[in-house]
Amino acid sequence: MAEGGVGLDPVICDLCEDKPAQFFCRTCDGNMCIDCKNDHKKKKMFLRHDVVKMTLTRKMELDGFGYCNVHPENKYELSCQSCEIPVCTKCISGKHNGHNMKDISTAYLDAKRRISEMMNEVDNHLIPTYRRNIEALESVLCNVKKQSKELEQTVVQRSKNLTDFIHLIEKEVTQKSLVDSAKYSNQIAAKKKEIESHLSFLQKLRASLLEQRDAKSMTDLILYTNENSKLAEREIKFQIPSFQPAYFLSDVAFEKTLNILFGLLLPSRLVNQKDPHLVLVKAKKLKEIKTTIELPCGLSVSYQNQAAVWVRGCENRVYKMDMNGTTLATFPTETGFGRPSELIELKDGNILYTDMENKKIKKVAKNLQKMGEIKTEWYPIGMCLSLSGHILVCVAQLKVLETNESDVGKILRMNYQGNIFQEIQRKSNNENLYTRPICISENVNQDICVSDCTKCSVIVVDRTGIFRFAYEGGFIQNDDRSFGPVELDTDKDGNILISDEENSLVHLLDIDGRFLQYILTAKDGISKPRGLKVDDEDRLWITEINAQRIKVFQYLD
């Protein structure tokens, strides 16, 4: 059939009244099968008749378009365009009076066309899309199973390596114990033999003395006594050694020691992909907070109160402030230079801050009392919390201060006690990744993003330390501007935000390092942005080095 099949009984030929009609004569208004149609056309009187193929709409006209649901005694006649339903004559004069009407056969064909378009969308787009989604999920599931198996093999191998190492230590310690035991046994046996020899001599001497004492010759006794009167000369003082047993010395709990030896497992994650938020063409300023802090150079969002930040200035004191400018807390810092290079608030409310000049990370309790420190080999600068439950620390060997050589930097992953689990320093070609890393943030995919003030670059590696990309400002070749990255942070979409103090810009990159836009420029009233942090509501907090204020912006739709 020309328009596809529908659930209609075939129309019978009006001439033979036997076969299904496939043609329709518009001149004589008759339905004909193919044989009768051929006979019809052969007759001279019917030669000019207009014979066309039978269509679905013609069949429906013959059989009718069905009976009205509201008025079952009436057939559908038209289609109401306003209500988009077929109507009978009573409907037209009643509820649908005054509505625009359409020929029902036209409405029928329109509906068929829309259904065909929907089927085409389902067949050519939706079904293939969801099949690809299923294939993608099966691929992810395959990766999960593969990674799980590989991880199991790795754990077994690491366990075997550790067990072999422990057995080697056991063998070495046991062997040393046996060697020491044999050596000490020989020394003790020699000492014992020496004493036994002298004891034998004394026993013989006693026997001789007893014999002389009982001798009958008085002259012989007197002479013997005179010759052997100095018994003290025959006394030898033997030094008897004391024994100090072996002892295992360890200042770390046994379980923690084993965990460190076994290695740190960065757990796998199933990350649900989300459509990224739209970036506003122009950032909207939500708040401008005035402060008395001189040279506010650093920010850190409070873990327990996302509507508050810790602010670092040029003095040896930090302040916790909310969006109303109220100081919620403050405490003095103990640093060589004055302000800490970085400060983070932990989940339990405790605080860590870096004392770069003294090569220490200081700990402050929730009640703002001192509670210890972590010593570092290199100078600690930037610091952030990791999704792994550890802290990531930028450290630098500031050789320029000591030997006038180039600086070298690296990233440490450590726990709150200072145990180091990972060091990130070089690319696969052994080239140094960092010179002076000053700020660090971990992205939603656990990429590690670092700003390097000496390299004038933002360097991003994955969580294993493999280099991903570097961003150097995105300026065109003939642009005289030099990129001056200071603080950076990431948002829920994985975007990377960077304060460019030198050019009074805030750069926005996507998760893969592609430049999106400048969120803020000098035209937005920003001058020398320094401190930069994004809170859990994706609000952007900014400080300007030459202004005693904090600005809060909305940049995502």
Image (tube, rainbow, N blue to C red):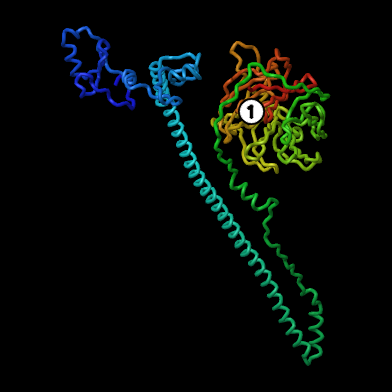
Q: Vertically, is 96 above or below 237?
A: above
Left or right: 521 as drawn, with respect to 429: right
The answer to which quarter of the image holds residue 78 is: top left
The quarter in which the C terminus is drawn is: top right
**Residue 385 percent location from the top left of the image:** 67, 36
Which residue is denoted by mark 1 in the rendering?
A: 491
How many marks the image carries: the answer is: 1
Which residue is at 79% across, 91% downward?
217
The answer to which quarter of the image holds residue 443 is: top right
- Mark 1 Cα shell of 10 Å, populated few (<14), some (14-19), many (≥20): many
Q: Is residue 108 visible?
A: yes
Q: Vertically, is 537 above or below 46?
A: below
Q: Residue furthest bottom?
A: 216
* Secondary structure state at the residue bearing disc 1: loop
Which residue is at 70% across, 38% downward?
377
The answer to which quarter of the image holds residue 272 is: top right
**Residue 237 percent location from the top left of the image:** 76, 70
**Residue 525 percent location from the top left of the image:** 73, 15
Q: Is residue 406 visible?
A: no
Label 1 sits on what residue type?
Asp
Residue in front for this viewpoint, 191 or 517: 517
